[in-house]
Amino acid sequence: MLNLILVLLAIWLVLSVIGLVVKGLFWLFVIGVVLFLATAAWGWFQRASR
């Protein structure tokens, strides 16, 4: 499960960087950041509940 969370975090981070680099894709940056934070919070809660 931890591997899945780390892979998702990496994907959201890459999408965020692409959204910042490519002009006109600021929405991709916003979605990437939101998904990164949601995945990080979900992973943190999963580990805290054990």
Image (cartoon, rainbow, N blue to C red):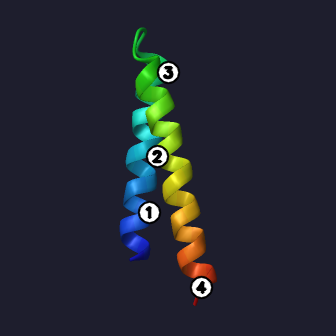
Q: Is residue 32 above or below residue 28?
A: below
Q: Residue at x 44, y 34 (%)?
A: 31
- Return the disc, 2 or 4, that comes first in the chain's sequence: 2
Q: Along the line of sight, which residue is nearer the eye, 20 or 32?
A: 32
Q: Residue at x 44, y 74 (%)?
A: 2
Amino acid under disc 4: Ser
Q: Which numbered circle lies on residue 6?
A: 1
Q: Which numbered circle lies on residue 28?
A: none
Q: Are marks 3 and 2 in contact (CB under 8 Å)?
A: no
Dot 3 corresponds to which residue?
20
- Return the disc, 4 or 3, that comes first in the chain's sequence: 3
The residues tagged by marks 4 and 3 sit, at their Cα atoms, a distance apart of 35 Å
Question: Horizontally, is 15 left or right of 20 in the view?
Answer: left
Q: Residues within 10 Å of mark 3 (few under 14, many from 20)?
A: some
Secondary structure under the numbered disc 4 in the rendered image: loop
The residues tagged by marks 2 and 1 sit, at their Cα atoms, a distance apart of 13 Å
Q: Which numbered circle lies on residue 35?
A: 2
Q: Nearer the viewer, mark 3 or mark 2?
A: 2
- Expressed as whole percent of the image width and height from the top left, the position of residue 8 reads 39, 56
Q: Residue at x 58, y 61 (%)?
A: 41
- Expressed as whole percent of the image width and height from the top left, the position of residue 16 reads 47, 33
Q: Are marks 4 and 3 in contact (CB under 8 Å)?
A: no
Amino acid under disc 3: Leu
Q: Nearer the viewer, mark 4 or mark 1?
A: 4
Q: Residues within 10 Å of mark 1 (few under 14, many from 20)?
A: some
Q: Is residue 13 above or below residue 16?
A: below
Amino acid under disc 2: Leu
The residues tagged by marks 4 and 1 sit, at their Cα atoms, a distance apart of 18 Å
The residues tagged by marks 3 and 1 sit, at their Cα atoms, a distance apart of 21 Å
The residues tagged by marks 2 and 4 sit, at their Cα atoms, a distance apart of 21 Å
Dot 4 corresponds to which residue?
49
Amino acid under disc 1: Leu
